[in-house]
Image (tube, coloured by chain):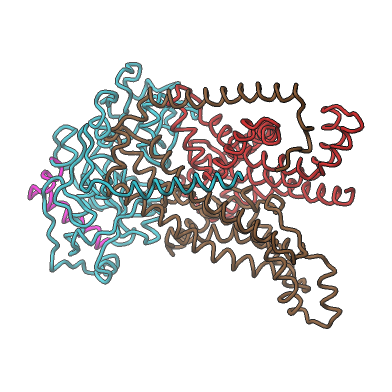
């Protein structure tokens, strides 16, 4: 970051002093807040050994691990399916034929407007209602796929549209056919433009698997509820949720780092004419969505 | 079809109460997260490193935590601080805490879309900080911010359904009540979807309108 | 720069996680005394010491449900996981409690080894759909027999009779029964019979009814003073009170009769009759009493087998 920002001039001696004072005050305020939370947690026994001793046991670690694996499994399968779904519907939306375009637009807009929780309920309860039970895993994966797939479709479309029009015009002018233009000219450039946005959407998808607990899919948060709900250990919800949050933050953080690294690498390559698809401008897409 | 309509008319009061609470959650958390999000955004572009670091940490922690877990902290951890908040306000706070991380990012990138040279030129002309902010930066930044802000708010509207898991009767809680009453889930869920479409459609139309209007003006 | 720091933190966190991944073997039993699981088979545990030997010649003529179980060689049983002494999943992943052992007993009479039971955690609100949809073969988990539910499923039993009661904080003397709940926050599981009763009879104001997916969450809220009472069947509440006698007590004024049945598919009378016969056998040969004494009996009072309701 450059030393001067849009809003502030380079500070002079007076401003530097004022900034330093404000800095000290805000550090003090932040430290006080953290200290208060830690003190209260300590006072109410959140750090007492009884509430944490469960985590020493292999069985409990295995419980967390299997929850984590269930989360990752659902996320992985849903990622693959959502990418496919997104690709299919994005190309339908980009089609010249309204017969493809209109239904695809309808589907994508519809699924983006339905809360993911309701989509998961659909996947779980409706087959049950008609006596055709569906595995909780698939109910969750279907919900995740429909929702995130629709968002990804929009990211893909935005990516293709981000390639300047002159590029495809030029390609048509030299005699390339439609699918050649898409394959040789648009996709390679669009791909780089939208990769960071795709990765941020995948972070969203990963976090969304936490909704699985509502239909008792045994994912990470569900495991946390079981561990935290053991009265014999003093109902250690706080310690357990702290551990679960740390796991989510590290995994999603790693994915975010990946997104950042990709963005860095891709902007270093000079040859894409497309501006990156900003994560925050594809509706919902981005960490900006649900959950 | 008659059966489908009956599900709605027989349970009209539940649907009404549920969606009223959804809208209330949306409005309260919407205002709350706009305020907190702008505040955090201001921290992130402020000249004070401690505040910048705090803003960045907040955003990175919250954005990488599932909303459900944020709710869980509000309901199960906050009481340990000897702070007793009822379930509906807890849900408002959880949504606010979560959504403001995203709003903060929108504010920050909105401000950053304004070229530094513009502000530098304004300062060279002798404008004060308030003048630079209100005359130069905000008019441009707001245009860049509004469409993504709308996206964030639409996402938040959908996110209110998570409150169902934390003892708030809103639209997302309706399926559980209906299961108790033995109503067919397909009809129930379809009505909920229709309810959300009615709520979201105007927001989407507004978003598209602003996007188009300002895209030309730029 | 910022992202690098985030990366570093993330790496440290994952390192810390992997470093922590070596721990004590064995059953985590807290210092405060918990439930030890003995005689474990598969996911099932048997604290009563009863061994459930599968019947080799089991047959239920004309039962579709039985054919399904027989061809699969296993049973899928719907249970609860958070009810101490009834249906509880301990820190080792073992299922323990009265309901679990009844489930094992039923499985063994159907010719299935209790080790072959696949447990599924089904929440109260989803039980009928899970049985109707065939997601589970039968359900054993504090499942009250009601006429309304008989429209969707059928019941064998009752194998136990409980009554709805209240769990309150030990120092709270303001709640003495169901008529003292006005203005108090009452918590129970979403979609359960007890909370419907509270709602239907207007024991407290609708805005004071609190619902969570599990009773443990309700108990946590009770201890945090966010609710004033947890209501459900005394059998469940006694389990919680027994684990935390310093802070919790059961009011002891039951205000309903909850007959626990085994939830079965609706139109399978052959299966229902068969399971009823087997429960009756357990009543008379003392198996039922042994199971009770080794689980629920540890925290409650002695009990006698209930009267079966065949239909």
Quadrant location, the N terminus of chain C: top right
Question: What shade has chain C been given?
Answer: cyan
Q: Is residue A151 visible?
A: no
Query: Which one is nearer the viewer's eye here, B128 or A230?
Result: B128
A103 or B130: nearer the eye?
A: B130
Answer whether residue C120 is visible to the viewer in this image. yes
Question: Residue C247 sits in which quadrant?
Answer: top left
**Above or below, B94 relative to C288:** above
Horizontal and vertical percent position of residue C134: 37, 62
Give me the residue at 37% from left, 49% from top.
C149
Residue C270 magenta: yes
Q: Among the chains, which one is brown?
A: A
The residue located at (59%, 33%) in the rendering is: B54
Q: Is residue A192 above or below residue A48?
A: below
Examine the rendered structure and indicate whether residue A189 appears above or below residue C78: below
In the rendered image, residue C72 lying in the magenta stretch gets the answer no
Establish if C30 lies above or below A200.
Answer: above
In the rendered image, the residue lying farthest to the right is B125
Magenta stretch mostly in which secondary structure? helix
Instruction: Answer left or right for C105 relative to A147.
Output: left
Q: Which chain is red?
A: B
Range of the magenta residues? C269-293
| Rendering coords of residue C303 (x, y %) | 15, 37
* Residue at position x 27%, y 37% in the image: C236
Question: As rendered, which of B76 and C4 lies closer to the eye?
Answer: C4
Q: Position of residue B51 (x, y in %)?
A: 63, 31
């Amino acid at each position: 970051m450059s030393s001067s920002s849009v809003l502030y001039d380079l500070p002079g001696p007076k401003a530097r002093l004022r900034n330093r004072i404000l800095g000290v005050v805000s550090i003090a305020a932040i430290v006080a807040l953290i200290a208060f939370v830690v003190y209260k947690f300590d006072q109410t026994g959140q750090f007492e050994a009884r509430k944490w001793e469960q985590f020493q046991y292999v069985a409990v670690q295995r419980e967390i691990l299997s929850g984590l694996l269930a989360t990752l499994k659902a996320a992985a399968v849903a990622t693959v399916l959502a990418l496919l779904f997104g690709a299919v519907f994005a190309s339908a939306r980009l089609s010249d034929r309204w017969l493809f375009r209109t239904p695809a637009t309808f589907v994508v807009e519809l699924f983006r407007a339905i809360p993911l929780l309701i989509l998961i309920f659909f996947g779980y309860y409706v087959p049950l209602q008609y006596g055709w039970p569906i595995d909780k895993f698939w109910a969750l994966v279907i919900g995740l796929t429909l929702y995130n797939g629709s968002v990804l479709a929009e990211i893909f479309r935005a990516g293709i549209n981000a390639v300047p029009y002159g590029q495809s015009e030029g390609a048509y002018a030299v005699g390339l056919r439609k699918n050649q233009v898409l394959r040789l000219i648009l996709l390679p450039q669009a791909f780089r433009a939208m990769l960071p946005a795709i990765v941020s959407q995948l972070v969203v998808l990963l976090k969304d698997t936490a909704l699985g607990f509502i239909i008792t899919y045994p994912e990470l948060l569900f495991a946390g509820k079981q561990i935290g709900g053991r009265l014999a250990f003093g109902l250690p919800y706080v310690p357990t949720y702290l551990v679960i949050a740390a796991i989510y933050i590290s995994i999603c953080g790693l994915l975010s780092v990946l997104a950042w690294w990709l963005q860095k690498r891709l902007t270093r390559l000079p040859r894409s004419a497309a501006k990156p698809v900003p994560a925050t401008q594809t509706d919902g897409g981005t960490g900006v969505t649900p959950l | 079809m008659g059966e489908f309509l009956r599900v709605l008319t027989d349970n009209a009061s539940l649907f009404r109460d549920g969606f009223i609470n959804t809208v209330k959650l949306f409005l309260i958390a919407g205002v709350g997260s706009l305020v907190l999000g702008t505040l955090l955004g201001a921290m992130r572009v402020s000249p004070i490193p401690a505040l910048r670091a705090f803003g960045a940490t907040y955003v990175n922690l919250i954005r990488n935590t599932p909303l459900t877990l944020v709710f869980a902290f509000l309901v199960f951890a906050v009481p340990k601080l000897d702070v007793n908040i009822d379930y509906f306000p807890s849900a408002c706070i959880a949504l606010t805490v979560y959504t403001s991380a995203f709003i903060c990012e929108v504010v920050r990138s909105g401000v950053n879309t304004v070229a530094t040279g513009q502000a530098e030129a304004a300062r060279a002309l002798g404008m004060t900080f308030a003048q630079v902010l209100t005359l130069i930066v905000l008019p441009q930044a707001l245009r860049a911010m509004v469409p993504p802000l709308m996206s964030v708010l639409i996402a938040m509207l959908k996110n209110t359904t998570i409150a169902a898991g934390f003892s708030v009767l809103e639209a997302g809680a309706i399926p559980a009540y209906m299961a108790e009453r033995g109503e067919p889930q397909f009809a129930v869920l379809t009505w909920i979807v229709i309810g959300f479409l009615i709520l979201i459609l105007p927001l989407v139309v507004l978003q598209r309108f602003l996007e188009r209007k300002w895209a030309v003006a730029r | 720069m910022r992202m690098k720091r985030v990366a570093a933190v993330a790496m440290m966190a994952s390192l810390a996680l992997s470093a922590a991944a070596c721990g004590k073997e064995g059953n985590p039993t807290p210092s405060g005394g918990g439930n030890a699981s003995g005689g474990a088979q598969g996911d099932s545990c048997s604290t009563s010491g009863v061994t459930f030997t599968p019947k080799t010649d089991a047959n239920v003529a004309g039962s579709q449900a039985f054919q399904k179980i027989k061809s699969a060689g296993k049973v899928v049983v719907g249970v609860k996981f958070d009810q101490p002494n009834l249906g509880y999943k301990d820190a080792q992943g073992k299922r323990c409690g009265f309901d679990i052992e009844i489930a094992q007993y039923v499985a063994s009479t159907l010719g299935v080894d209790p080790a072959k039971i696949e447990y599924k955690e089904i929440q109260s609100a989803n039980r009928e759909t899970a049985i109707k949809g065939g997601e589970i073969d039968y359900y054993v988990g504090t499942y009250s027999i009601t006429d309304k539910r008989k429209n969707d499923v059928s019941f064998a039993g009752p194998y136990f009779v409980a009554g709805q009661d209240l769990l309150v904080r030990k120092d709270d003397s303001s709640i003495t029964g169901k008529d003292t709940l006005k203005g108090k926050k009452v918590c129970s599981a979403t979609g359960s019979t007890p909370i419907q009763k509270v709602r239907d009879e207007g024991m407290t104001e609708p805005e004071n009814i609190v619902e969570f997916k599990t009773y443990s969450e309700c108990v946590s809220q009770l201890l945090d003073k966010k609710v004033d009472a947890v209501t459900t069947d005394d059998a469940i509440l006694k389990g919680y009170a027994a684990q935390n006698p310093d802070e919790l007590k059961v009011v002891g004024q039951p205000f309903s009769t909850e007959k626990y049945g085994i939830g079965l598919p609706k139109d399978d009378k052959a299966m229902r009759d068969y399971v009823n016969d087997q429960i009756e056998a357990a009543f008379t040969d003392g198996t039922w009493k042994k199971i009770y004494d080794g689980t629920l009996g540890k925290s409650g009072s002695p009990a006698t087998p209930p009267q079966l309701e065949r239909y």
